[in-house]
Amino acid sequence: MADKLGSSHCELQGNIFGFMQRISQFFVDLYNQIGDFIARIAKGAAAWIATAEYTTQRNLNEIRTWISGSL
C-alpha cells in the first residue's frame, strides 16, 4: 500500500519513508522491552527459587533437630 501511495505521490515518499521507519523502530523498541521484561522475571524467579530451596532445607533441618531432641 505504501509503495502504491509513494508511486502516485512522489512528493510524499520522504514522509512515507520516515513514517515507516518510526513504525519499525516502535516495534523494535517494543520487542526489546518485552524481552527485557521477561529476562527480569526469569532472573527474579531464579533468585526466588534459590532462596526458597535454601529456606526450605534450613526449616527441614530445624524440624529434624527439634524432633531428634524431643526423643
Image: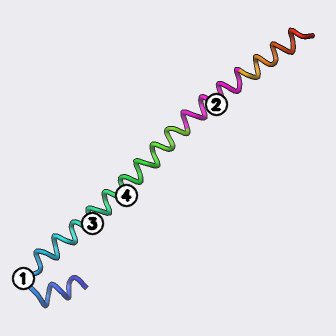
Circle 4: element type: helix
For mark 1, what is the residue?
Answer: 11
Q: How far across and down, in percent of the image, does residue 52 sit?
A: 64, 30
**CA gap, disc 3 and disc 1:** 21 Å
Say which element carries label 1: helix
Give the mark nearer the N terminus: 2 vs 3.
3
Specify which label sits upstream in the sequence, 2 or 1.
1
Pointer 3: residues within 10 angstroms few (<14), some, or many (20+)? few
Callout 2 crowding tier (Cα within 10 Å): few <14, some 14–19, many ≥20: few
Say which residue label 2 marks.
Answer: 52
Q: CA distance from mark 2 to mark 3?
A: 42 Å
Residue under the point 26% across and 62% down: 25
> Is residue 60 left or right of 1 when viewed as pictured?
right
Q: Earlier in the sequence, mark 4 or mark 3?
A: 3
Query: Is residue 39 placed above or below 50 in the rendered structure?
Result: below
Q: Which residue is mark 4?
A: 31
Q: Which residue is mark 3?
A: 24
Q: Is-magenta flag for residue 49? A: yes
Q: CA distance from mark 4 to mark 2?
A: 31 Å
Disc 1 to disc 4, C-alpha distance: 32 Å
Q: Earlier in the sequence, mark 1 or mark 4?
A: 1
Q: Quadrant of residue 8?
A: bottom left
Residue 22 in the magenta stretch? The answer is no
Type of amino acid at the residue the image marks with label 1? Glu
- Callout 4 environment at 10 Å: few (<14), some (14 to 19), or many (20+)? few
